[in-house]
Amino acid sequence: MPVCLAIRKGSIPDFKAALGPESGNERWFFSKGILLPLLYRAEMLVWRSLARKVFLLTYQFPTDPASRKAPTLELEHLLAAARYFQKLLEGWQKPVSSGATVQAGRTHMNTLFMAPTPIIPLDKSKKLAPHRGVVYGNQQPDIVAIEAIVASLVQQDLLHGFISHNQGKFAILGSKQRGGPLKAGFPGVWETMAKRAEEDKRVDDVPGWVRKERAQAMLGGVVNLTGIARPVGSGQ
């Protein structure tokens, strides 16, 4: 459940924690042979959810219903969220809410993008293992990494649109034809993966799964490496 909730929220720190030693379940996941598939395949779903949430928080819907301008996600906004998560992973703390971002005891919904940065820096950041950072260890995300992550999501059909490198934006295609930018730009995950599996003729396979020895085989196990390349957000 913590893994599922982290994916749904688009929370990279929650996702890392749910699969890390602090969860108390890391050894169990490892013993069942599913720790690495979860780490390196489910993370792309976290990034998709994060991109969707950032789009919802920042996109200004046009007032003219006849506007033909494509909805866009500012990559700098996604980068701001990634850097915020990196700092949380390194041990920076959220301060007690102040009047600058709170009214009537409630935190402003856009606190993530408001100044000053709503976290307290440390004298020394926590040393992160390569797979425990947003991109790689203590490496701070940059716009190049964000572009690569979004491009990977597009290639995997988890986002529908294109990147404008010069403008620093991800543009969503077919918004009006598909009932709005959310349906057009962020297709359903299950439908997308089921369609690709059918096209690749691997509907009975689980990518990355370690299979038991078959009766006619003399091997100790068979590993299906289909599509097991490291996903968005992982290191080199």
Image (cartoon, rainbow, N blue to C red):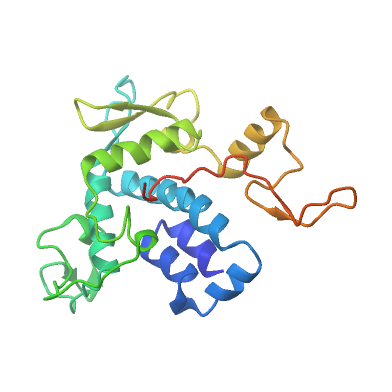
Residue with the most extreme right position: 215
Residue 174 rendering spot, x and y as whole percentages: 44, 23
**Left or right, 59 with reference to 29:** left
Q: Is the N terminus in the top left, top right, bottom left or bottom right quadrant? A: bottom right
**Left or right, 18 with reference to 66:** right
The answer to which of 58 and 234 lies nearer the viewer is 234
Q: In the image, what residue occupies the spot 15% across and 67% down?
A: 101
Number of numbered discs on residues: 0
Depicted 211 relative to depicted 127: above or below: above
Depicted 136 relative to depicted 66: above or below: below
Figure quadrant of residue 227:
top right
Q: In the image, what residue occupies the spot 26% across and 61% down?
A: 86
Figure quadrant of residue 224:
top right
**Left or right, 91 with reference to 158:** left
The answer to which of 43 and 175 lies nearer the viewer is 43
Residue with the most extreme front position: 218
Depicted 2 relative to depicted 47: above or below: below
Q: In the image, what residue occupies the spot 11% across and 76% down?
A: 123
Residue 160 rendering spot, x and y as whole percentages: 45, 30
Can residue 59 be seen in this snapshot? Answer: no
Residue 71 rendering spot, x and y as whole percentages: 32, 30
